Image (tube, rainbow, N blue to C red):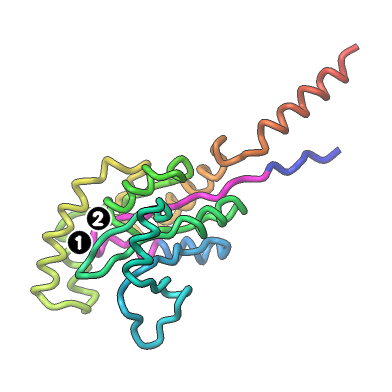
Amino acid sequence: MAAATVPRRGLLIILSSPSGAGKSTLARRLMAWDPTLSFSVSATTRTPRPGEVDGKDYHFLTEPAFKALVADGAMLEHAHVFGNFYGSPMAPVAEAIDAGRDVLFDIDWQGAQQIRNSALGRHTLSIFILPPSIPELKRRLVSRGQDGPEVIAKRMQKSWDEISHWDGYDYVLVNDDLDATFDRLRTIVTAERLRRAQQPGLAGHVRRLHDEFLEDQP
């Protein structure tokens, strides 16, 4: 008789890094590798920009509605940035992981800490991406051609604050080679999906094995 398939819970996969370390590229590769992965859609109190779709780009909320969700404990993490609130609603994430779907978060160390301390914290997988060196990090920021010298200087200053929290993560990868780093990232995700806590059907399967064992005794 074929072995029963043991269902699994989804993971909350957190990727963090200083700007320019390669986090966004690795996230895109991860989602291309497994199309069942989805990004967590954040909620915000800011006004939608042209072309943005409610529920796809963000969940656009009024400030009272956002604060009510925070007060009810319905946000996995939240922050006040440049005059607006941003956060990750818990309900859609809980629904996804209960259905066995992984959810990807691109957040900083403060958001990662909040999620780890939330009701869904035991299902998190947190990974921090380090650059191979500070000169290489700056070179990457400059080569992108997206920011001027002043903005790059601010990003570099902020990068050290981000890097200083590396030891709060489950895994830390030095992105010295993108292909090799992605291979390691994929290996981590594959292994973490098999954690005992992610397989709620294991206890029932073991009980069935026990019953079958007793039935097989003379």
In the image, 143: left or right of 115?
left
Across and down, in percent, residue 16 comes to 32, 55
Find out whether the residues at labels 2 and 1 contact each other: C-beta distance under 8 Å: yes
In the image, 205: left or right of 109?
right
Q: Of residues 128 and 100, which is closer to you in this image?
A: 100
Highlighted range, magenta? 7-26
Reading the image, the residue beneath label 1 is 137
Q: Among all residues in the image, which is located at the extreme right?
A: 218
Say what secondary structure mark 2 lies in.
loop
Q: Earlier in the sequence, mark 2 or mark 1?
A: 2
Q: Say which residue appears at 31% left-offset and 62% top-offset.
A: 22
Across and down, in percent, residue 193 comes to 55, 45
Q: Quadrant of residue 71?
A: bottom left
**Placement of the N terminus among the 4 image quadrants:** top right
- Above or below for 207 versus 43: above
Reading the image, the residue beneath label 2 is 131
